[in-house]
Image (tube, grey):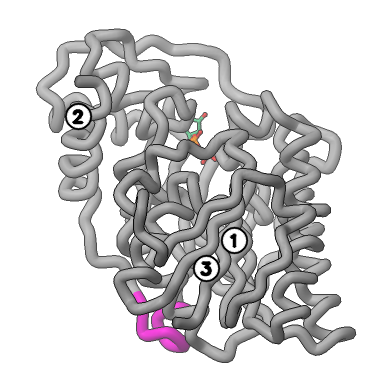
């Protein structure tokens, strides 16, 4: 059985990728230092030898005497609250982690895929964001530990590709949501769902006019796997172009949960992108991919999962 190595495989998107690749007939090797990951996300594979888990840092991955075909680098704190809490670890995940996983791919002649991010576009001056846009990132702001780490990671990946001939891919993920996000993850959807379900005030940072575009995790996973199986090397956006203000999102969560939680306004986050929406023409034409799950459906499934996590 061919092996897919997934750093960050105990995390939110990573664990859904593990499920998907094993379902498609691969073995999965997970490398996760559990800084923001949770072993419970892989509990369904306990005692199943198709999933092997190493709880260690991916900057120095274990030697694997296995037929590794693909290497996916998904290890990193990804919620603004997390990467502001773990700034140096986030920089290391993008720099040392990316190098470690690229060397693993190189040693096995495997195709490598980097989980990059819409944060490489920063607070964008081009809307919607096309892959050819270079972005607008404050290099010394609090978000830079994530934004610049991912920008550096993309640069390292392209250097390994151009200089060493490693077969590489880069996916730029836009906001993704679904089951297995942590209740205290800090991002808008988990915060609002948790607050609505527990009767606490919904925290709106700033005036709520910022926009985001939310992609349900099963759509994201399908897009990532199509890119993995392709022969593309340049970055591809994967996200749902449906764009909502944060205030609209809060209202949808309140409606879907039937909650009477009030809205409270808190100070805006520094350098918070004012708008975000993916241009997915590349994914549509080159991967024949587009998202299929509408926000209200995805929210309903996410709310169900959060209710079970709370119970
Ligand atoms: N946000 C908010 N209240 C929260 C969490 C987030 O108003 O409790 C806002 C945040 O300031 C940003 C948007 O929601 O404008 C999306 O934030 P999130 O942390 O989900 O991810 P980001 O897209 O910023 O990485």
The residue nearer to you, when weighing 250 against 301, is: 301
Residue that label 2 marks: 308
- The answer to which of marks 1 and 2 sits earlier in the sequence is 1
Residue 259 placement (x, y as % from top left)? 15, 17
Q: Quadrant of the C terminus?
A: top left
Q: Quadrant of residue 162?
A: bottom right
Numbered label attached to residue 237: 3
Residue 22 placement (x, y as % from top left)? 36, 69
| SS category of the residue bearing label 3 | strand
Q: Quadrant of the N terminus?
A: bottom left
Image position of 153 (left or right of 49)? right
Q: Is residue 136 visible?
A: no
Name the residue at 29% across, 34% down. 248
- The answer to which of marks 3 and 2 sits earlier in the sequence is 3
Start-end of magenta stretch: 283-289
Q: Is residue 96 visible?
A: yes
Image position of 100 (left or right of 254)? right
């Amino acid at each position: 059985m061919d092996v897919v190595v997934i750093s960050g495989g105990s995390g939110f998107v990573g664990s859904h990728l593990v499920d998907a690749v094993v379902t498609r007939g691969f073995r999965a090797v997970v490398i996760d230092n559990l800084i923001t990951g949770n072993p419970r996300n892989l509990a369904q594979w306990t005692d199943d030898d198709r999933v092997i888990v190493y709880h260690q840092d991916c900057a120095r991955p274990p030697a694997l005497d296995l037929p590794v075909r693909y290497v996916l680098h998904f290890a990193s704190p990804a919620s603004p609250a997390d990467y502001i809490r773990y700034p140096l670890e986030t920089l290391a995940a993008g720099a040392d982690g990316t190098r470690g996983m690229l060397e693993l791919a190189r040693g096995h002649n495997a195709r490598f895929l980097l989980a990059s991010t819409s944060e490489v576009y920063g607070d964008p001056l081009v809307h919607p964001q096309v892959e050819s846009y270079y972005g607008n990132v404050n290099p010394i702001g609090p978000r830079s530990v994530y934004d610049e780490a991912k920008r550096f990671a993309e640069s390292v990946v392209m250097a390994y590709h151009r200089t060493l001939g490693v077969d590489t891919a880069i996916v730029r993920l836009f906001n993704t949501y679904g089951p297995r996000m942590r209740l205290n993850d800090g991002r808008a959807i988990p915060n609002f769902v948790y607050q609505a379900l527990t009767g606490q005030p919904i925290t709106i940072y700033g005036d709520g006019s910022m926009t985001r575009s939310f992609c349900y995790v099963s759509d994201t996973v399908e897009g990532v796997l199509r890119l993995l199986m392709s022969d593309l090397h340049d970055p591809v956006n994967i996200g749902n172009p449906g764009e909502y203000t944060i205030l609209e999102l809060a209202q949808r969560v309140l409606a879907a949960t039937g909650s009477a939680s009030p809205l409270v306004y808190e100070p805006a986050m520094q350098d918070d992108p004012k708008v975000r929406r993916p241009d997915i023409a590349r994914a549509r034409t080159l991967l024949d991919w587009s998202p299929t799950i509408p926000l209200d459906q995805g929210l309903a499934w996410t709310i169900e999962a959060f209710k079970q996590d709370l119970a």
